[in-house]
Amino acid sequence: MVKKVKSGKVVKSGPKKTSTKPKGKVVKAVTVVDAGDAVEDESDAGATTTAVAVPKAKKGSSDGLVSKDLIEKALKQLKLFIDRSAEDSKDSEKQQLFEDELISEIQLQLTKPSLWSSKVDLKPRVIALDRKVTEQPKIALFVRDGLIDKELLEKIEQSELNNSISQIIAGQELKTTYKPYEKRRQLVKEFDIFLADDALITTLPKLLGKVFYDSNSKVPVPVNVGKNGFNIERVQREVAKIVNGIIYRLPRSDNLVIKLGSLENVNPDIVSQVIANFAPESLRGVFIKSNNSPALPLYESEIAFTKDDLPESNTAVVETESQDNVLEIGGEQVKLSSFERALVELAHDEQVPQLLASKIKKAKKAKKESAKKEKIESKKLLGVNTGKSKVVKKSAKSKSKK
């Protein structure tokens, strides 16, 4: 059943893979051991550490950048590591608090010579995968005020979208009910995925705050709900793509970590699809690991850096950063903070002037004051004193009256 409360909240309850392969090779990390050593360690009851075998790549068996055979071997070794870690924790006196939930989480690490993003990036990205998730996550959707009326709610209730989205929250509700920090903290814990009307996305960082945006996994994903109002079919397609895909954000570093999910839900096909979304020539290394295991190398480039990856000097970097934080809007040069620059990246072009209205106004005012100051300075240089001339004129008029 779907109902809309007076505060504005809508609550629902009830039922090209590339063929270009760069020069590189699969290498072994010094922190892990070979498969033969791992088998020996497994039989050693007195071992205090858990060994992980590094799978060796087979020559001639390549599926893109990394062969699926190699990925499968790496996943098998991670499973052995996770199983042995679980057994060791049971025997030990100290029990890890979140071990049962997090120990089997798999991560893919992609490194490149340069930064993945040179500025703060608030926009989540989605990798579409050829799979269907069996367990439906709990989803909340943020929409702008007045977008959904009573008639539309009835249509949503009768559609497939009714089973996909657990709660729809209007913008006004975020400004009132969820304004207290504790309410927002409860909200972020209640749902697995947050989606947002892309017309509302630029206002969300200020409404939701650090509770959402300090966590990469809970940042609202922008959704195009339709050009002319809320399109149920379009939103359902977007939701299916996001649920079956993988969400990530670009970090301000050279190491991108993508969470693939629990080991039981990860297979070589999924890992290959994720890697295929990135240009092979831009990658320096590809690694796979669990939350507490060593990183197993799947690929490492023979050339780590080139001259093009290094700036000419530190001053060049500073100049680039300062230029990135200045935006020209309507002929005005507007200086932005890193946070404001990230908001601009989220917004549509037509939303930018409205989003930065106060900044544009200040820039125009500063420009006028600067022009006025320059005019006064130029007159002073020419020997013209406007204030003194006015005094002389007033005194001449007073004498004529007398």
Image: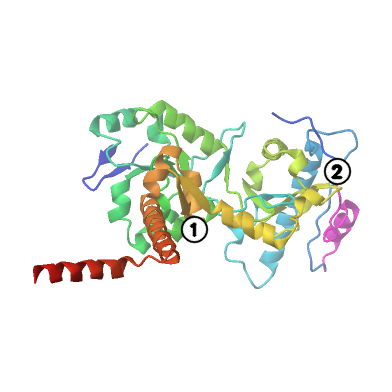
Q: Residue 132 — which label?
A: none
The image quadrant that residue 2 belongs to is top left
Residue at (39, 40) in percent of width and height: 199
Q: How many other residues sit within 10 Å of disc 1, few (<14), some (14-19) or many (≥20)?
A: few
State yes or no: discs 1 and 2 in contact (Cβ < 8 Å): no
Residue 29 belongs to the span the image colors magenta: yes
Let me know if residue 252 appears in the view: no
Residue type at mark 2 is Gly
Q: Quadrant of the N terminus?
A: top left
Q: How many other residues sit within 10 Å of disc 2, few (<14), some (14-19) or many (≥20)?
A: some
Q: Residue 24 — which label?
A: 2
Tell me the magenta residue range. 26-46
Residue at (42, 39) in percent of width and height: 198
In three-dimensional space, the C-alpha distance between marks 1 and 2, rounded to whole angstroms, equals 39 Å
Name the side, left or right, on which 42 lies relative to 319. Answer: right
Q: Where residue 227 sits: x, y (%)?
A: 39, 28
The image quadrant that residue 181 belongs to is bottom left
Q: Nearer the viewer, residue 130 or 395?
A: 395
Q: Is residue 214 above or below residue 146?
A: below
Q: Quadrant of the C terminus?
A: bottom left
Q: Residue 337 — which label?
A: 1
Residue 88 belongs to the span the image colors magenta: no
Q: Nearer the viewer, residue 26 or 335?
A: 335
Q: Where residue 67 sits: x, y (%)?
A: 80, 37
Name the side, left or right, on which 81 lies relative to 145. Answer: right
Q: Which element is circle 1 on? A: loop
Name the side, left or right, on which 267 lies relative to 155. Answer: right
Mark earlier in primary sequence (1, 2): 2
Residue type at mark 1 is Ser
Q: Where residue 244 sits: x, y (%)?
A: 55, 36
Q: Where residue 188 sits: x, y (%)?
A: 43, 54
